Amino acid sequence: MFDIIAFDADDTLWHTEIMFIETQARFRQMLVPWADAATVDQTLYQAELKGFADFGYGIKGFALAMVETALALSGGQIAARDIQRIIDFAREMRRWPVDLLDGVQPVVARLAQTHKLMIITKGELIDQESKIARSGLADYFSRIEVVSDKTPETYAALFDRHGIDAARFVMIGNSLRSDILPVLAIGGEAVFVPYRTTWAHERVADEHNPGGYHEIEHIAQLPALIEELSREQAPRRKRGGRTAPA
Amino acid sequence: MFDIIAFDADDTLWHTEIMFIETQARFRQMLVPWADAATVDQTLYQAELKGFADFGYGIKGFALAMVETALALSGGQIAARDIQRIIDFAREMRRWPVDLLDGVQPVVARLAQTHKLMIITKGELIDQESKIARSGLADYFSRIEVVSDKTPETYAALFDRHGIDAARFVMIGNSLRSDILPVLAIGGEAVFVPYRTTWAHERVADEHNPGGYHEIEHIAQLPALIEELSREQAPRRKRGGRTAPA
């Protein structure tokens, strides 16, 4: 049995990537006089990568990367009103409706009856808190953690802080890089639920994928998998023997 | 006795306001062709206020407010390289050295020997985590909480989460609005240590100041005050009587 079932949020519980894709399409349109779509995408991605260390993941970092890309690709010719529009894009993104993925609500409601649920999400505090509040799901989760990055160290620190036994923890998410591999690395279980598109930064090359996780196509398959894993875990533990009480 | 002594971070443990003041001075210089200093300050402050709901407190929100202010006050005439400079200001702020306030290191080290210490700070996760890591103080604190705002509700949620008894909690900080009044409102004790300058947004008009907190001029006075309050608390509790064990 698992003590904790933890969920990633963006593109696991609700759609997020689509918001970046749609905003980026409008941004590309703005830069048509100076660069083709592929150049815009590539330059913006480089600006985002450069920005992570200073500005982190999230809407504001994305906005600053768009401003830098627009200045660079237009050779400084971009109109002031277009810079303002980029900042307004960021405002719209902050207010974007929270659109749950199909099947999420009933699955979360059902699992909350039998397990402690947690959200572990990367990004900006103010943005994630607002989305969680607007999602209608907050009451199903006993713990919500917004972290600046998802590494084995981040998860280990969370486990330590919440007294979580890694062997009785399972993480559900759409990013191999952030939700699955770091959890496996410290002895937890992980369930990969791929989203229809994956941001380049979250992709993992095949040669860096050690396997060892579970994969489902749709979150509706999660309760059955959790039940199956719980059944498997019990005998496996028994076979491993128990230490005698001191 | 207190179970927890919690500290605000910016301008309580280390200097922060000075970084905003110096950056704002450079920004004002940039806008000399279009606006006087007072107009720049006022327009920027309005842009920050407008930005809080969407962008929160912190360096990136400040950068976006500077960009909006520059576009507005220059009537769109601001040069592209100056917009880029504003983003570079934000990068410099992120890398600004962490300069502890005089007396902080020994006081924190001393109190950590007798009490559980906590940091409760407002702002951006990535920025605050980086400053805490660079401050050299992280090991003295058993809990570090970065919150998106500091209201009575925020503190109540933290108390709930950490099982903190408000009557045995004291908050130390430089902002009446964020560190002192909300803590008093939910039954904690608070020690106000004014910083030499207070950001307009954190100021509290006299008529909204109910008193009831402790004020010291310098953090070096904190250990003696904590000791004094602990001595006072014990008899006060006794006078209140104890409930008989069930």
Image (cartoon, coloured by chain):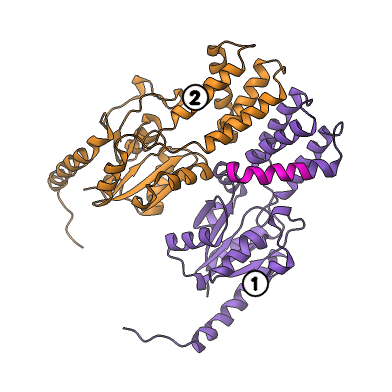
Chain colours: A purple, B orange
Mark yes or no: residue A199 visible: no
Dot 1: within a 10 Å radius of its alpha carbon, few (fewer than 14), some, or many (20 or more) residues? some
Question: As displayed, is residue B72 above or below residue A114?
Answer: above
Name the side, left or right, on which B198 lies relative to A103. left
The residue at the point 52 percent across, 41 percent down is B124
Which label lies toward us, 2 or 1? Answer: 2
Question: As displayed, is residue A6 above or below residue B239?
Answer: below
Which numbered marker is on residue B22? 2
The chain to which mark 1 is attached is A
- Point out residue B98 in the picture as x, y percentages from the top left corner: 43, 38
Magenta residue span = A42-56
Magenta span contains residue B107: no
- Point out residue B225 in the picture as x, y percentages from the top left corner: 20, 38
Magenta span contains residue A55: yes
Residue at image mark 1? A213
Residue under disc 2 on the same chain as residue under disc 1: no
The chain to which mark 2 is attached is B
Per the image, label 1 sits on a secondary structure element best described as loop
